[in-house]
Image (tube, rainbow, N blue to C red):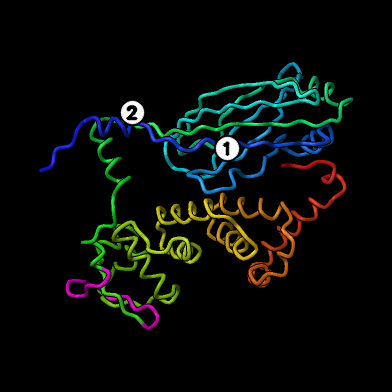
């Protein structure tokens, strides 16, 4: 057996991701504050960032806090929209008033998978900021730097080894053979023009839908809600935790994962949507997937793309299919566009 030096695992005690920089510019700041105060919750969100592929995506959340004495403070939070690991984040942010005087804060944030946002609460007086900015152009700029580290030091040594093993694991060739082996299977699934000989116990362990399907004595089932090539990838994932074409099949795979209640495959497809660049050809698929498969982060990602007003998106095949198949979702987008086109919202911009 090959020996492994302990220092190898110490080297993996911290996984570092590239530094992320983002700037959010709000012009006509006082008018913008007015629109926030007319909402039920005094909250506004920045566009999604970064644009380029990244292990996680973020938004800034601006919130107005009213204290017991009536004073109004502003808060700034960092909101993760993907990433299921425990993350240590160094959040350095500053905002500039019209004199370009920076007001800075630095925070070490520890995100867990259940955290919706973390940041700095009540860090500046809102009336003072409004008063200082009004005579000088009324523009406020928020700039932040996000440095992400995934900490493994809190795990014991055995868990470290397992984490390292999973991070470097290759597809399990032995399990993948089950895709093409029909000698030992105990159930047949007919999908379109193909028949898959599969294994009840394995499928039932990964999916409650399959577990319920296999309650009786039947050994042959017809599956008519998924294409054969997509179903093959679902089986590949069930056997090996891998798929062969995640980028090209993420939309159909997310639908199948939703249908068969495979949460980890839904999460994998979600990450594939969020690290990819949207275009006129793909944004409708992301919008539909995020809505009908109940993945809010993907829906928000698509809506942020539409907010930027890409020319010609209403003429694309994806949009026309969305209007026909999901009219309520199309109406939601139309309402968003009407709001963005209003005179009030033309008075401020994000960048």
Instruction: Give the residue displayed 69% in from the left and 63% down from the top.
Output: 330
Residue most extreme to the right: 135
Dot 1: few (<14), some (14–19), or many (≥20) neighbours within 10 Å?
many
What element does badge 1 sit on? strand
Instruction: Give the residue displayed 55% in from the left and 23% down from the top.
Output: 107
Residue most extreme to the left: 1
Q: Is residue 242 left or right of residue 337?
A: left
Return the x and y of residue 198 as percentages of the image width and height: 26, 70
Return the x and y of residue 351 as percentages of the image width and height: 72, 42
Return the x and y of residue 257 as percentages of the image width and height: 43, 61
Return the x and y of residue 127 as percentages of the image width and height: 80, 22
**Could you say which disc has been placed on residue 350 in the image?**
none
Residue 101 quadrant: top right
Residue 76 quadrant: top right
Label 2, on which residue?
153
Measure the alpha-carbon separation of dots 2 and 1.
24 Å
Number of the front mark, 2 or 1: 2
Q: Nearer the viewer, residue 64 or 1?
A: 1
263 drawn magenta? no
Q: Earlier in the sequence, mark 2 or mark 1?
A: 1
191 drawn magenta? yes
What element does badge 2 sit on? loop
Q: Is residue 236 left or right of residue 265?
A: left
Q: Is residue 150 left or right of residue 56?
A: left
Q: Nearer the viewer, residue 318 or 42?
A: 318
| Main secondary structure of the magenta stretch | loop
Instruction: Give the residue displayed 69% in from the left and 31% down from the top.
Output: 142
Q: Is residue 24 left or right of residue 84?
A: right
Quadrant of the frame with the N terminus: top left
- The stretch of residues the image draws in magenta is 179-193
**Could you say which disc has been placed on residue 79 in the image?**
1
Q: Nearer the viewer, residue 246 or 8?
A: 8
């Amino acid at each position: 057996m090959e020996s492994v030096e302990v220092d190898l695992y110490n080297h993996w005690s911290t996984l570092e991701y590239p530094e992320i920089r983002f700037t959010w510019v709000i012009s006509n700041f006082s008018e913008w504050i007015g629109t926030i105060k007319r909402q039920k919750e005094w909250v506004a969100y920045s566009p999604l960032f970064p644009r380029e592929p990244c292990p996680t995506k973020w938004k800034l959340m601006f919130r107005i806090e009213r204290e017991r004495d009536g004073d109004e403070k502003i808060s700034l939070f960092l909101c993760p929209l993907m990433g299921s690991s425990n993350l240590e984040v160094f959040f350095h942010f500053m905002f500039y008033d019209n004199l370009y005087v920076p007001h800075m804060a630095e925070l070490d944030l520890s995100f867990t998978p259940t955290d919706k946002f973390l940041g700095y609460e009540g860090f500046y007086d809102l009336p003072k900021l409004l008063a200082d900015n009004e005579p000088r152009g009324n523009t406020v700029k928020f700039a932040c730097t996000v440095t992400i580290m995934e900490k493994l030091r809190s795990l014991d040594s055995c868990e470290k080894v397992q984490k390292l093993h999973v991070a470097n694991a290759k597809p399990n060739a032995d399990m993948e053979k089950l895709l093409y082996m029909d000698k030992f299977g105990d159930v047949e699934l007919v999908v379109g023009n193909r028949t898959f000989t599969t294994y009840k116990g394995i499928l039932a362990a990964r999916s409650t839908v399959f577990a319920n399907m296999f309650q009786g004595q039947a050994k042959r089932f017809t599956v008519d809600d998924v294409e054969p090539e997509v179903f093959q990838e679902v089986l590949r994932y069930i056997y090996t935790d891998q798929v062969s074409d995640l980028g090209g099949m993420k939309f159909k795979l997310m639908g199948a994962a939703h249908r068969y209640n495979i949460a980890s495959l839904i999460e994998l497809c979600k990450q594939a949507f969020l690290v990819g660049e949207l275009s006129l050809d793909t944004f409708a698929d992301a919008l539909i997937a995020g809505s009908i498969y109940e993945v809010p982060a993907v829906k928000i990602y698509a809506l942020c793309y539409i907010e930027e007003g890409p020319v010609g998106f209403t003429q694309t095949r994806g949009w026309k299919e969305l209007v026909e198949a999901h009219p309520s979702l199309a109406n939601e987008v139309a309402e968003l566009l009407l709001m963005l086109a209003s005179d009030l919202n033309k008075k401020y911009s994000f960048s």
